[in-house]
Image (cartoon, helix red, strand yellow):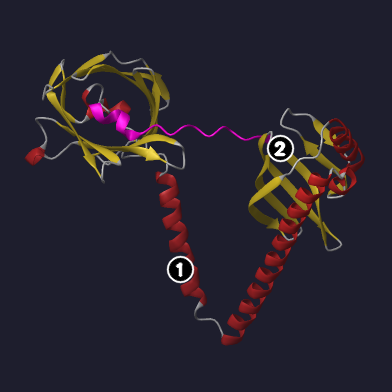
């Protein structure tokens, strides 16, 4: 739970870190719409010409992407056969391969020797390659990102390709270990938070936590005696984020500030790393520690606080008590 506004108000009003992305996305849409409107007055021949160029470019990119994906499939086949020479031929003559350890192999010849030595000491294994994306920053450059899967483990890679004489070759490949997937922590582990709460040192504060969205999320409303018509001064939504693989919270206050936090369970503690900005764009960040004492009380403390361009001291530990005792 976010108790910021009641225990050192302005420096800790956090905002959603992605607000810039949302704003940027809306601006892109506005600019694109304006450009489309401005170009609508052009001649029919100009439009047709632009359409043909666009169609041709898209067809070429689609063909190039298909070729790169086909090479990835062939790479998997060659690896399964233990064919070091065929693998090395996918690199340019002076191409490089950087292993997860940081070791860098330079040149097709060195890369072939590396694979030959590997297959000599290890029986060939089935390799699966999942090409996640292929981007073209320039007509003759492509960036491929994906995952390789072996019985012994998975890796992620980034391959930079160059097109020479109509043929794509890898000029630089970076491999790194794929992070282990975190075990999902059920939002039900925070069910003890459901109910009405108040800070022992601040009778002005009331916190109400309830399930919402078929118990997929918790909604936490913060009230004070200054709230009009019993309207919450702040609202926090807590739930599992499948993209980040962790429990997250999204915080909104009546001043227009927004915040986002990532939750991690550590024994009886919940550690929350939060960041964002105030309504005027002032950036802030902090770590929260929630310690469950029992079903009717927990402690809250804020550390590593940063706001308005400077570090702030840790907050005092606050004891939060249940108002509807179990």
Instruction: Please state if 153 lies on the left or on the right of 310 as rendered.
Output: right
**What residue sits right under mark 2 in the picture?**
175
Rendered-image quadrant of the C terminus: top left
Q: Does dot 1 land on a helix, a strand or a loop?
A: helix
Q: Between residues 81 and 36, which one lies in front from this camera angle?
A: 81
Q: Quadrant of residue 17?
A: top left
Classify 10 Å Cα crowding around label 2: few (below 14), some (14-19), many (20 and above): some
> In this orientation, does residue 305 appear?
no
For the point 66% across and 54% down, the residue is 134
Q: Is residue 205 above or below residue 41?
A: above
Residue 106: percent from left, percent from top:
86, 37
Q: Is residue 140 above or below residue 128?
A: below
Q: Residue furthest front?
A: 123
For the point 43% across and 45% down, the residue is 20
C-alpha separation, residue under disc 2 versus residue under disc 1: 42 Å
Q: Is residue 41 above or below residue 285?
A: below
**What residue sits right under mark 1 in the picture?**
34
Query: Magenta segment range?
Result: 175-192
Q: What is the total number of numbered labels drawn onto the structure image? A: 2
Q: Quadrant of residue 164?
A: bottom right
Residue 93 painted magenta: no
Instruction: Please state if 12 lies on the left or on the right of 23 as rendered.
Output: left
Q: Between residues 36 and 71, which one lies in front from this camera angle?
A: 71
């Amino acid at each position: 739970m976010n108790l910021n506004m009641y225990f050192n108000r302005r420096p800790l009003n956090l905002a959603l870190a992605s607000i810039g992305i949302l704003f940027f996305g809306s601006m892109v849409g506005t600019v694109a719409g304006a450009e489309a409107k401005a170009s609508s007055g052009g001649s029919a021949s100009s439009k047709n010409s632009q359409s043909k160029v666009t169609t041709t470019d898209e067809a070429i990119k689609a063909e190039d992407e298909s070729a790169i994906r086909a090479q990835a499939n062939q790479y998997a086949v060659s690896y399964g056969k233990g064919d070091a020479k065929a693998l090395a031929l996918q690199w340019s003559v002076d191409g490089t391969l950087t292993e997860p350890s940081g070791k860098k192999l330079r040149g097709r010849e060195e890369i072939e020797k590396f694979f030959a030595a590997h297959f000599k000491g290890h029986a060939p294994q089935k390799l699966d390659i999942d090409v996640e994306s292929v981007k073209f920053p320039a007509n003759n450059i492509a960036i491929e990102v994906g995952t390789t899967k072996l019985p012994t483990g998975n890796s992620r890679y980034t391959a930079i390709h160059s097109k020479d004489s109509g043929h794509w070759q890898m000029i630089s490949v970076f491999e790194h270990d794929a992070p282990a997937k975190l075990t999902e922590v059920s939002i039900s582990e925070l069910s003890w938070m459901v109910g009405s709460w108040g800070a022992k040192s601040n009778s002005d504060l009331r916190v109400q936590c309830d399930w919402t969205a078929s118990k997929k999320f918790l909604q936490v409303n913060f009230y004070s005696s200054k709230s009009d018509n019993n309207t919450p001064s702040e609202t926090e939504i807590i739930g599992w984020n499948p993209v980040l693989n962790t429990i997250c919270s999204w915080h909104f206050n009546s001043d227009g500030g927004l915040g986002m936090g990532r939750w991690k369970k550590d024994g009886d503690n919940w550690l929350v790393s939060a960041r964002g900005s105030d309504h005027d764009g002032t950036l802030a960040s902090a770590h929260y520690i929630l310690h469950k004492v029992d079903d009717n009380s927990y402690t809250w403390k804020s550390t590593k606080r940063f706001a308005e361009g400077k570090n702030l001291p840790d907050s005092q530990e606050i004891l939060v008590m249940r108002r509807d005792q179990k």
